[in-house]
Image (cartoon, rainbow, N blue to C red):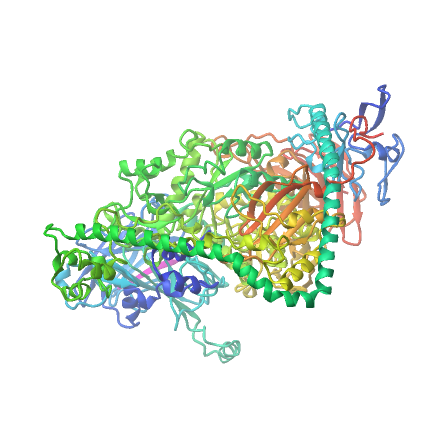
Amino acid sequence: SFGLWGITLLMGLLSVFFVCLFFSSAFAVDRGNFKTCDQSAFCKRQRAFKPGQSPYRALLETLELSDSRLTLQLINDNNKVHLLLELYRLQGNMTRVKINELKPLKPRFEVPDVLIAEPPTDLSVLSKDDNGVVLSLGAESQRLIVSARPFRLDIMEGPEVLLSLNSRGLLAFEHLRLRKDTNKEEDGLWEETFKSHTDTKPNGPTSISLDFSLPGVEHVYGIPEHADDLKLKTTDGGDPYRLYNLDVFQYELYNPMALYGSIPLMLAHNTQRTMGIFWLNAAETWVDISSNTAGKTVFGKMLDFVQGSSEKPQTDVRWISESGIIDVFIMLGPKPSDVFSQYASLTGTQSFPPLASLGYHQCRWNYNDQEDVKSVDQGFDQHDIPYDFIWLDIEHADGKRYFTWDPHKFSQPKEMLQGLMDKKRKMVAIVDPHIKVDSGYKIHNEITSKDFYVKNKDGGNYEGWCWPGNSGYPDFTNPEMRAWWASMFAYDQYEGSMENLFTWNDMNEPSVFNGPEVTMHKDALHGKWEHRDIHNMYGLYVQMATAEGQIQRSGGAERPFVLTRAFFAGSQRFGAVWTGDNAAEWDHLKISIPMCLSLGLVGVSFCGADVGGFFKNPSTELLVRWYQTGAYQPFFRAHAHLDTTRREPWLFGPENTALIREAVRQRYALLPYWYQLFFQAYRTGMPVMRPLWVDYPKDTATFTIDDEFLIGSDLLVHPVTEEGSRGVTAYLPGAGEVWYDVHTFQKHNGAQNLYIPVTLSSIPVFQRGGSIIPRKDRVRRSSACMENDPYTLYVALSPKKFAEGKLYIDDGHSFNYDTKKEFIHRSLTFANNALTSSNLCPDCNFLTSSWIEKVLILGASKPSKVVLKMNGKETPVDFEFDSSMSVLTLRKPGMNAGDDWTLLLQ
Amino acid sequence: MTCLHLLLTLVFAVSLGTPVEIQRPRGVPLTKKQFYEEGKPFTCLDGSRTIPFDRVNDDYCDCKDGSDEPGTAACPNGSFHCTNAGYRPMFIPSSRINDGICDCCDTTDEYNSGAKCENTCKELGRKEREVLQKMAEITKEGFLLKQQLIEEAKKGREEKQGKVTDMQENKKQLEEKVEALRTVKEAAEQPEKEAKERHLKAWEAIRLEKDKAKMAEAFLELDDNSDGFVSVSELQSHAELDPDADGTLTETEVQGLMGGAAQVDTSTFESVWTNIKDKYHSESQPEEPAPVETPPDEVKEPAVDNDSEPYPEDDISEEDDEDEDDKDDYHEDDDKVRVNIEKELSFDFGPDAEFTYMYSQCYELSTNAHVPRIWGSWSGPENNKYLVMKYEHGTGCWQGPNRSTTVKLTCGKETVVTSTSEPSRCEYLMEFTTPAVCQEPANTEPSPHGHEEL
């Protein structure tokens, strides 16, 4: 939520830099605060290697094969250092490639706690000769070929090469060495200085690099977090994409600079196949992308095609990390959904959030006091706008001592929380991982006495500046520390907390105002590992421990809700993520779409951007458009910087209040659909908000679209993100399919660019023909108030008069769906003029008082009679038919939402 | 499936106190009762369609305007009427029917949700009557006070207008007098000026005394071996004195500070002290403490150097001068006075100039902030713009707007600030009570009693 302006002020306190920083803090990132590849010694060193002959050779005579793995030594002919290659064939069409030193001077870091289990394996050798080994990769005639000189791996299916490793010879593994053995004192090997910060490198150079070639691939995605387009760009001539969790003040758009989180998973896609490369390394990482078609014009490509002389399009990527080992998972798809489930089998799926957290969140830095909270809460009721959570930023705590309350402004937190609970609403209070060094602060004293702080290179407690001033940083990599942290969320430890209080972890990159690149020194120590090794997963651990605390405080009964700014692979298991400190600018509204799409592709479905923009004041039009967009993104929270003017939804005149109200109401009506999608994401790893190509993988027109998106498979959203827009052109995918405008029920054909005239009230949203979406159209002041309300089913018929969908119902907040199978999961199918609800989980038990109040069938023809068949009885159902839009409305069929039934159109 | 009662029997008291049963569908106000005739087809109030009466309040929305479901939550745009006997009737959005939260004090909105609501109407009614009674008293007295204010303002205005007229007529005459008056003024100011100089001298003496004491202390501290001399090496231990701030204090640099001497005694130390006193850190006092207690975001201005004592001249208020404007026209330039009065006369002090008295007052707030003596612009609601005053375009805030203040006025016997807050960064809100906004009390006493509906 904040950023480097804190530094500006801090420095202002400390020195004369005040003035210069003060004036340079215009609304743009100060790029000079962050490293380029050239300024990062290992990146520069690695990037200086050019493709060509690799010095690495596979020693085939060392090959050993067991049931689970193949091992083989590699030798670097230049320095004779031996590496150990391990190959695993993993169930579910995945291959794992591990490369470490055969005999490192001391162990190198291997990332723990990200994989949910050791993946199961199967592997067998097909043939072996002097030049290499051929391994069978399961059923689909897939083979893995190990070439010996130079070392290279090729994964093939039939005659096609799907993916090659070290094909450009960029494998480079800096082995651990003694300083005295270093021949020349090359810059940055044993020490590196950036700005005023020196990184002592007691282990010397430890970086690793490997290249991958993807023949036939022109589109690669993923590796968030970057404020850039969905489709990754080539990095020739510029910096590689950087993965290094950083608190970037007022980040700029459309560049490969690192941001708050890192997920080292890249997806490669073409019309035939989707694949994934998961680079399991938590150190600073850079990713280079090049393509043989990137420079070509469309005309050039056409010419190649016509002449038939074209080389095959190919994308090459190179991963470079500062330390650790090479541990890569190759996911071979082939469908997008296969890659999602493959990755989910490794790192887990999205946690299933409490239903209320899918509602609207009202945040601001800061709601000043309890009175303020109360009046904002009342404002929502006065203006009849639903919301579920109100948030408190850092000012709520006593001097930024987290887990406490300001004794004057928030003297009666339980009274405040009870007031919200009476309206079935909830609160989030921030708990950051920097702990004020203050002997009067319980949390600090306990961490000190338990020796849980991260250590500096000299072994003392690491201290840095953050919001409270001088702060310590708990070592979240330590499981004992995490267990202690979790115990701090118990109701008797966290005074003033109640069951409707949830948590927000900010600044967990970690942000250190006076540290190098505003983060922790790489030579700080987490037990025996350097911060360098674990940096990108610090934030994951903070959220993990916090979510665990919330689960524990309820004795394991209630689902947690924790928002994090920093994240890593696996973070999806612990809660929601937002895109950090954006700005009230149209481009920031636009970028929220590719940023959340990229996160969805790599497992993090619960993503959102600060509605309205964090820095600066949005124009009224921008604010309205942002609400309209945010209402259709997974995590829907408005937030604003301390220095902005107030922007609660009713402060911009009755017309704009009405527009915002309408957007929020659309969100609430669709909550049953969102909830069911999150259940699917939790079960299967399918992203909730997804790019069009995920559902239309053969339609090349969808491959670069990132100004519109799908929610599940059935809703297509093209938000208006241009100032003064009078119309948008939406691409409706799917030849032979139809889409229905959800507001007018107008039917449109698929596989076309559709121009949609818009006014300020327009949110272009389409429902896919062939889908059934349950809604709760009785929108109330919070999601919990709607718990027992009836459903309306929106049945959108395909041209073949078919539709299907799902309905999921549970208590909305507990783990009983998991532990006691207390949920309703129903399949809704429309075929042969009959709409049927059937049970997808016969051994589940949950009772609901919700019923079906209405069924709308879009694209229907007029029946003469409609009959409800249930429990062997038939009863007539009233209906209306709108012939102009072909909409059939069944009036009050009235069955319970958990029942088996059929509605027959005759 | 939920099946709801079609009709609700409502019992309430009419003015005679006789209980009369009036049947109408749930959630319908009495004023609309005639549209809901039992057994007869119901026409949506917007006329859009007609439905059988059994579809009124059957928990399914048939009318676009929501009028067929006044007592259920079925229509997104419906509203529910609660009678709230004993208090005041009200409409709530129908989305609040049976949502588990008590909205109507008579509990009628939660008839099927299991929420345990208590009827609080009588209590609310009693409280409201008390408040209204109190308000009526305040308004009555406040309105009387307002009349006085209007009277005073009228007089004051006439005086000032007269003054301006006089001034304009006698401008020439006054100009001639200016010289003479100036002499008089200077004579009158002489004692004040002398007092000021005396004060300055005294302050300077104190400052010198303090400096001397500091110097003596420093000498004793520096003279590590207590031989009565401060030597080069003794001074060199104080790295903070490093003139080129390169991190080391060389011997040459120390000699420079000591004017070339190898050692100095107490008398010659004075010249050395002048060279070092700005940088010198006392050994007995800790280094400047790290500003731990100051959260970075609360610091808006560079810290003030605590060591140098500012001459307290700033405290001699300039506001005093301004406040004398309309008292003493010989003290100031006449033209300025005239312009000020004209300016003042041009301000909007309300329809009867009842706000005039506020102009020359400055209200102390609990926070010690001041209302600047400027007149903002009235920006209340259309029916009474004099309820809110806005002061805009104050000094700028870092990354924020220019400071602005909104003052809300409510009727009261006294002119007092009842609350101050900063709802948004650099936007302040003050609430005042003042007789000047008290409206003439209505002829009839307000009696909420028995006025619910009929």
Residue at the (69%, 61%) spot, across then down: A758
Q: Quadrant of the N terminus of chain B?
A: top right
Count of all numbered marks drawn on residues in the image? 0
Q: Quadrant of residue B413?
A: top right
Q: Nearer the viewer, residue A78 or A578?
A: A578
Q: Quadrant of the C terminus of chain B?
A: top right
Q: Nearer the viewer, residue A311 or A627?
A: A627
Q: Is residue A780 visible?
A: yes
User: Horizontal placement of A207 versus A391: left or right?
Assistant: left
**B21 over B360 or under it: above or below:** above
Q: Main secondary structure of the magenta part?
A: strand
User: Horizontal placement of B159 versus A638: left or right?
Assistant: right
Q: Position of residue A221 (x, y in %)?
A: 46, 61
Q: Quadrant of residue A199?
A: bottom left
Instruction: Magenta stretch: give its range.
Output: A141-147
Q: Quadrant of residue B101?
A: top right
Q: Is residue A174 visible?
A: no
**B94 over A304 or under it: above or below:** above
Q: Position of residue A344 (x, y in %)?
A: 43, 48
Indicate whether residue A428 is drawn in magenta. no
